[in-house]
Each structure stands twice: as structure tokens, then as C-alpha cells.
Image (cartoon, helix red, strand yellow):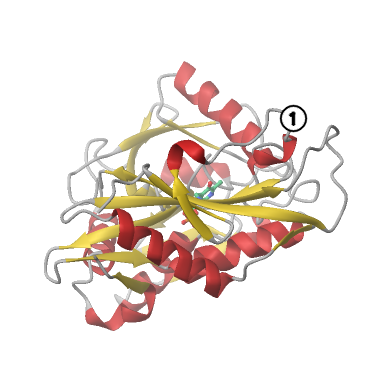
């Protein structure tokens, strides 16, 4: 197999990674007129196979983000799911987990930012190795960002578009300047939303709560996964408005996202969560369950997995 990063899928064809270039004038490729996804595929030791996790859901969200951006991709979610699976079958190496990065951007040399509605979108799919942190006891610290979340009525949080990430970057830099790993954004009403690249959940008195979509969060696929796994494990779940003070009083707090996976927080704004050192029991239970599901060790979630043929 070719290594991730040696071959890329671009508009229906595979090409050497070095040949997948754009002109510097093509403002569409990674600026306001671009939407993207981050997708994981995990090696399953039991099955000796790479398993794409919720590929179709990610591709559906990419197409939706492009549609809301008024760009026109030439591929639907099923075609992009098949393309990602084929790309992985070319690059997969036994034992390795692979991150998949599809994105779409306005075709052509646009010399102004106001790319018109209906502009065709190019779609590309790149990939690279990553190392999963599941089951390693990794934790993080959080800080409430001094930059509030972008108003979702101005730029919807449900669109996974690069332009939304200026806010995330400013918040991340702010959190790091105060010694924390990741920011937590509040919206204009002071309610908790999400982190820069992950959603957030709190556990209090055994009930798992995460901000509802109306609070202004990405419709995260990991969030959906966690809500389902928690419910099926008998944990009560709520999607609702969450006050900032609840962060400081919660028994457990964790981030959830494709890249973050399930990442327990042990401190927020210098205040300990739980014992301040390790994840609480419900977070640990969900992390373990998530770990088993993505590696194909639980048969009841087969519909989320895309088995990758290796050639
Ligand atoms: N919120 C933001 C802002 C993100 O960038 C991400 C990562 N895509 C998430 C939440 C988590 O989404 P998902 O679980 O679909 O990866």
C-alpha cells in the first residue's frame, strides 16, 4: 500500500500527493469559501482490518456545509463515502490508524471573497496517520475563552467551514496563554457552547448534559455517538442550555470530537474537576465503550463502520 500523504483523491481521481496543487490566486481553496471534515478510521486487531468510523455521516455533513455555503459539489455523500474507502484501501498499512481530511472549496480563480451562490466546489480527500489517545489515561485542562463564541445567527455553528475557526483559534491562543490546553466558549447569553475543535459534556449527579444545538454548537458526530452510547448504557442524558457556573460544580467534564475522542477535563479556570487528576467513572465508562465501538469490538454498532479492503 502507498502511505497516507502519498496519494490524494481529487474530484474523482487519485493522483500523487505532490501533484495536487492550486494556484495562489485561488482564494476558494482554504478561505471563506471552503468547508471540511475530520474523520477517523481505526485499525481493528480482532478483525485485522481498518474500519472507517461514521464515514457517511461525516460526508453528509460536508455536503450540507457546502450547500449552506452556497457551493455546488459534484459528488453526493454516498460517492464521497466510497471515495474515502477506496483512498484508504490504497494507503492503509496493517496496525495503523488513519485520519481522513475531506474538504470542498470554490473552483476557479476568484480574486474577490464574495464568491457567488451556486459556484461549483472542488472536493478533495487527504489522509495521514494519527495516534489514538483512547485508553491511555490522557486528560486536559480548560479555560473559558475571553472571546465569546461567534454568534450562530451570524455564522451558523452547524456549518463546518474554515471561516468559523478564526474564533476557535483566538480562544485556543487565549486558553494557552493562561496555561490551559483548550478553550470553552460561551455564547452571547453567557451559556456554554463547545471548545475550538470538540463538543463538551458535563456529568452531575449521574446525569450527562451537553449544550443543545440552539446554544450554538456543531452537530458533532461524536456528540451523537456519546448520547447514544450513554443512553444505551443506562446513563440519563440531556441536551439543554448549560450555565457557565455548572462547569465549576460538575462531577465530571469531558470534551468529545473526532480528534479529541473522549478527553476528560481535570481542571477549568484553575478549579479542579473531580479529584483534579483523573477522569470520573461515567467518563471512563464512555471512553472505554467508545474505544471498543470504533475498533469494531461491539457488534451492535456495525452500521457506523466502513470496513476497508486492503489490496
Ligand atoms: N465542535 C467543533 C468546533 C469542531 O471543530 C469539532 C470537530 N469536527 C467538533 C465540535 C466535534 O465534531 P465531530 O464529533 O463531528 O468530530
Q: Quadrant of the C terminus?
A: bottom left
Name the residue rendered at 38%, 74% in the picture.
304
On the image, which quarter does residue 22 sit in?
A: top right
Q: Judge from the rendering whether residue 293 lies leftward or rightward of residue 74; answer left or right.
A: left
Q: Position of residue 74 (x, y in %)?
A: 68, 65
Q: Judge from the rendering whether residue 169 lies leftward or rightward of residue 119; answer left or right.
A: left
Circle 1 crowding by C-alpha within 10 Å: few under 14, some 14–19, many from 20: few
Task: Work out which residue is located at the far left of the displayed protein and give it.
Answer: 46
Residue 43 makes an appearance in the image: yes
**On screen, 61 above or below 144?**
below
Task: Work out which residue is located at the far top of the displayed protein and give it.
Answer: 177
Name the residue rendered at 30%, 53% in the picture.
91
Q: Judge from the rendering whether residue 74 lies leftward or rightward of residue 289; answer left or right.
A: right
Residue under numbered circle 1: 25
Q: Position of residue 66 (x, y in %)?
A: 70, 57
Name the residue rendered at 62%, 67% in the picture.
75
Q: Position of residue 110 (x, y in %)?
A: 81, 37
Q: Dot 1: what SS?
A: loop
Q: Quadrant of the N terminus?
A: bottom left
On the image, which quarter does residue 65 sit in?
A: bottom right
Q: Position of residue 213 (x, y in %)?
A: 63, 61
User: Front-most of 196 and 274?
Assistant: 196
Amino acid at each position: 500500500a502507498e502511505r497516507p500523504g502519498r496519494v490524494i483523491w481529487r474530484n474523482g481521481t487519485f493522483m500523487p500527493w505532490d501533484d495536487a496543487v492550486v494556484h495562489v490566486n485561488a482564494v476558494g481553496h482554504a478561505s471563506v469559501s471552503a468547508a471540511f471534515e475530520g474523520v477517523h478510521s481505526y485499525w481493528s486487531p480482532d478483525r485485522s482490518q481498518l474500519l472507517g468510523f461514521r464515514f457517511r455521516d461525516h460526508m453528509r455533513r460536508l455536503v450540507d456545509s457546502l450547500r449552506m455555503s452556497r457551493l455546488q459539489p459534484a459528488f453526493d455523500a454516498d460517492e464521497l463515502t466510497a471515495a474515502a474507502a477506496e483512498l484508504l484501501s490504497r494507503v492503509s498499512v496493517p496496525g495503523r490508524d488513519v485520519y481522513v481530511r475531506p474538504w470542498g472549496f470554490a473552483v476557479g480563480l476568484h480574486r474577490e471573497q464574495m464568491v457567488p451562490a451556486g459556484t461549483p466546489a472542488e472536493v478533495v480527500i487527504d489522509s495521514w496517520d494519527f495516534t489514538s489517545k483512547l485508553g491511555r489515561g490522557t486528560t486536559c485542562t480548560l479555560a473559558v475563552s475571553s472571546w465569546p463564541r461567534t454568534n450562530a445567527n451570524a455564522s451558523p455553528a452547524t456549518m463546518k467551514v474554515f471561516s468559523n475557526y478564526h474564533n476557535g483559534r483566538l480562544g485556543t491562543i487565549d486558553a494557552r496563554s493562561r496555561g490551559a490546553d483548550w478553550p470553552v466558549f460561551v455564547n452571547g447569553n453567557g451559556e456554554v457552547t463547545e471548545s475550538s475543535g470538540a463538543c463538551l459534556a458535563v456529568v452531575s449527579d449521574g446525569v450527562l448534559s451537553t449544550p443543545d444545538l440552539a446554544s450554538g454548537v456543531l452537530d458533532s458526530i461524536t456528540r451523537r455517538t456519546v448520547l447514544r452510547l450513554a443512553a444505551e448504557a443506562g446513563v440519563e442524558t440531556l441536551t439543554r442550555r448549560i450555565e457557565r457556573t455548572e462547569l465549576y460544580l460538575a462531577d465530571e467534564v469531558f470534551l468529545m470530537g473526532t480528534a479529541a475522542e473522549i478527553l476528560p477535563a481535570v481542571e477549568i479556570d484553575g478549579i479542579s474537576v473531580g479529584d483534579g487528576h483523573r477522569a470520573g467513572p461515567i467518563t471512563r465508562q464512555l471512553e472505554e465503550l467508545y474505544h471498543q465501538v470504533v475498533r469494531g469490538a461491539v457488534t451492535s454498532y456495525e452500521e457506523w463502520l466502513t470496513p476497508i479492503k486492503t489490496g
